[in-house]
Image (tube, helix red, strand yellow):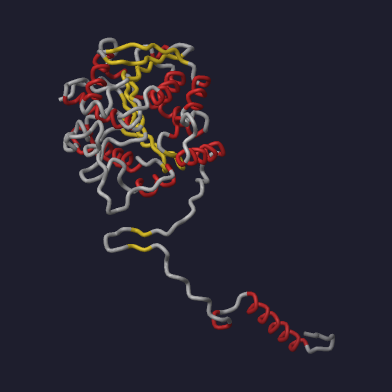
Amino acid sequence: MNLTSNTHPALLCGKILIAGLVSFLVMFPFPSAVAQAPERPSHPVSVDGDGNIHVPAQVVPQSAYLSPEGKAYVTQHLKDMITPPPGGFMKPYLERESTLYPAETQDTTMGGVHVVIYTPKDGISAKNKDRVLIQLHGGGFSGCWPSCAVLESRPMTALGHIKVVSVDYREGPKNKFPAASEDVAAVYTEVLKTHRPENVGIYGCSAGGMLTAMSLAWFQTHNLPRPGAAGIYCAGAGSPPGVGTMGGDAAYTSTPIGEARLSPGPDAPPVTRQSSPGYFQGSDPKNPMVNPVISAEVMAKFPPTLIITGTRDMAMSGALYTHEQLSKAGVDAELHVWEGMFHGFFYNPDPPESQDAFNTMVRFFDTHLGKSKGAKQE
């Protein structure tokens, strides 16, 4: 457009207005001024009549909330799940823990049960001289002694400056329920000869977390005093009837991105502890000593309980459900969920997320041990 100096002011304003309008329409066209956009495809996620959600294949990136060390750790873990390294992935963790968390060990028996007692190299603190922790290792009730026991015990004794008794309880398939509960009770009974119940904590990861809950139920039934605090890590206290041991949403969301494996489809029958050919074969899922979470009365008698899991932990749903039931029963229960982390993530002691988890455990027991007397279970 050519605007000369002798153009009438009104005409000049009109031409400028028209030019501006044309430029606006070019940059921000009205719907009627442009061709219709192609119709948006239907939503790729569908829901069937039973409420099953059909999700297409997708790429799941690392959580943006993870530390750089955490991202590298998760990546290596997933690769190890697909192609296990020679000698297993725990060996470097064990070597690293021996450096980070020096401890003295005593191989002995308590109540006729084999145990290893851990004490910090620099000694037990004054406030913990009358306190003790009982540790129950993971391993699916079928192994991982002593590796899992070491990985769960060393950090607690070194960071907490407290004695830890790790229990080598009987496992399947050679042994069946209630062998492990009996062993934990035997050790606990022996510990009570020198410690008040409110000064005793009990904890474990995975199978050890489940056994922690089962032991608390066993103590109630056998009239043993309630300990001062408990930690259920990478596990829940059981599952409702008809729900598998790794059921709930986590079986479909957390398992693939945490363990690099698929869960059974929705039509597959739930895998229960009672139906497996191992430690729980033939046990009764309606027995609260096997499945504590089904009994509100049993759960109500739990001591203060710390629950730890991760968003990629295949046991996350069970952990969340356990926390719900404890809270509903009025128990002082804490739930800590680590974003982007998988089942038993703190076995590697180096990532900041693992260090935060151990510090949370130490702080929880330090807060609750010795605070209330362990009453006899009725």
| Left or right: residue 294 compared with residue 38 | left
| Left or right: residue 374 compared with residue 1 | left
Percent position of residue 79, x then y: 50, 41
Percent position of residue 213, x then y: 27, 30
For this orientation, the residue located farthest to the right is 5
Percent position of residue 68, x then y: 57, 39
- Number of numbered discs present? 0
User: Picture quarter containing residue 132?
Assistant: top left
Residue depicted at 42% across the width and 59% down the height: 56
- Return the residue nearer the eye: 169 or 191: 169
In the rendered view of the protein, which quadrant contains the C terminus? top left
Residue depicted at 27% across the width and 28% down the height: 172
Residue depicted at 27% across the width and 33% down the height: 331
| Left or right: residue 29 compared with residue 5 | left
Vertical placement of residue 60 versus 173, above or below: below
In the rendered view of the protein, which quadrant contains the N terminus? bottom right
User: Picture quarter containing residue 170?
Assistant: top left
For this orientation, the residue located farthest to the left is 378
| Left or right: residue 248 compared with residue 155 | left
- Return the residue nearer the eye: 177 or 339: 177
Residue depicted at 46% across the width and 56% down the height: 58
Percent position of residue 358, x then y: 44, 28
- Return the residue nearer the eye: 40 or 17: 40
